[in-house]
Image (cartoon, rainbow, N blue to C red):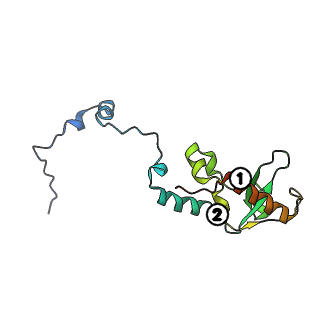
């Protein structure tokens, strides 16, 4: 038994004889600036953000006395203490959709340590005041 290939005489085979440059000119790719993530519906993006920003061991509250800003880092001591939510630095839209979102999807730990000598209750009050002042709590509307 032998395999045969039939060529449809109506099929356009001119693309096989064109140069690669001519083929790329023929295929018009849609130009869009939005990433695949940002083209998804908001409900799906919210699930992705929640999954990406959930830390297994919770997040530790940190604040900077010199800048007056606060952030959250992984509670795991091996994490290095860097800010957990890096998504918000990707673009303006991700900032708008994910800033402070990590505080909604994680357990927040307030502790008195070397980088943050403020008592835990004062840290909580500081965070609550900042949230109430900005009313920024993440998620796509």
How far across and how far down the image is residue 85, in percent?
A: 66, 54
Left or right of residue 82: residue 139: left
The answer to which quarter of the image holds residue 104 is bottom right
Label 1 vs label 2, nearer the camera: 1
The 10 Å Cα crowd at callout 2, few under 14, some 14 to 19, many 20 or more, is some
The 10 Å Cα crowd at callout 1, few under 14, some 14 to 19, many 20 or more, is few
Screen quadrant of the N terminus: bottom left
Given residues 135 and 96, the one toward you in this image is: 135
Tell which circle, 1 or 2, labels the residue nearer the N-terminal end.
2
Give the residue pinned by disc 1: 133
Q: Is mark 1 on a helix, strand or loop?
A: helix
Residue located at (44% from left, 49% from top): 39
How far across and how far down the image is residue 100, in percent?
A: 66, 55
How far across and how far down the image is residue 20, in percent?
A: 32, 33
Left or right of residue 136: residue 81: right
- Position of residue 112 relative to residue 33, above or below, is below
- The number of numbered discs placed on residues in the rendered structure image is 2
Residue 104: image tag: 2
């Amino acid at each position: 038994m032998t395999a045969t290939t039939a060529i449809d005489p109506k099929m356009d085979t001119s693309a096989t004889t064109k140069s690669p440059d001519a083929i790329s000119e023929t295929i018009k790719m849609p130009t869009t600036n939005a990433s695949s993530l940002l083209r998804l519906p908001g409900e799906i993006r919210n699930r992705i953000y929640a999954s990406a920003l959930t830390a297994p061991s919770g997040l530790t509250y940190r604040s900077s006395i010199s800048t007056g800003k606060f952030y959250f880092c992984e509670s795991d001591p091996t994490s290095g203490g860097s800010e957990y939510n890096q998504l918000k630095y990707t673009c303006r839209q991700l900032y708008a959709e994910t800033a402070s979102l990590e505080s909604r999807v994680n357990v927040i730990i307030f502790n008195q340590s070397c980088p943050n000598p403020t008592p835990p209750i004062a840290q909580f009050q500081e965070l609550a005041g900042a949230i109430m002042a900005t009313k920024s709590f993440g998620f796509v509307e």
